[in-house]
Image (cartoon, rainbow, N blue to C red):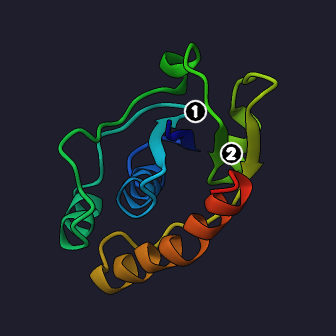
Amino acid sequence: MNKKVLLLCKDNSALSIMAEAVLNKYLKEVDASSAAVKKIKAINPAVQTALIKDTSWSDTYMSKAVLGLLEEEFDLVIALDSLSSKAMPEFSDNTIVIEIEYEHPNYENSTQMERFIKTLKMELIPITRDILEL
């Protein structure tokens, strides 16, 4: 059975969507989801374009609020910015909760977007694999 990972950011329009897509594509032992801790916004079109180029986009990705996911059990919750770390709700005692703070790239610069996706691959995948002992 795959491990369940939840990625949180402020509005679930870019950062956590990219992290969700990267984990789902490149870490097959994981079922990743993402959510907003504050107000949900539409997914940034530049994020979708970058993920399509990386072949990690799925039409199932959508912005959602963390409050709608509180009934689910997660093995790992990752806050991707300090705001989400401070505003996240409580999770099960069995859930590992960490913060990995990323600076938002310039979403309108395709080169920066490609570099950021590469950074997620190089950092987020090994950290997730290590914590979940995959």
Location of the C terminus by quadrant is bottom right
30 lies left or right of 26: right
Rendered position, 9 above or below 14? above
Amino acid of disc 2:
Leu
29 lies left or right of 75: left
Rendered position, 99 above or below 110? above
Which percent across, then down, holds residue 57?
24, 56
Q: Which residue is mark 2?
A: 83
**2 and 1 marks in contact (CB < 8 Å):** yes
Residue 16 visible to an observer of this rendering: yes
The front one of 99 and 106 is 99
Rendered position, 70 above or below 82? above
Residue at (62%, 69%) from the top-left corner? 126
The front one of 133 and 13 is 133
Q: Which residue is mark 1?
A: 37
Q: Earlier in the sequence, mark 2 or mark 1?
A: 1
Residue at (22%, 56%) from the top-left corner? 45
Amino acid of disc 1:
Val
75 lies left or right of 47: right
Which percent across, then down, holds residue 5?
56, 42
Q: Distance of mark 2 from mark 1, alpha carbons?
A: 8 Å
Residue at (35%, 59%) from the top-left corner? 25
Which percent across, then down, holds residue 119?
52, 78
Residue at (75%, 23%) from the top-left corner? 90
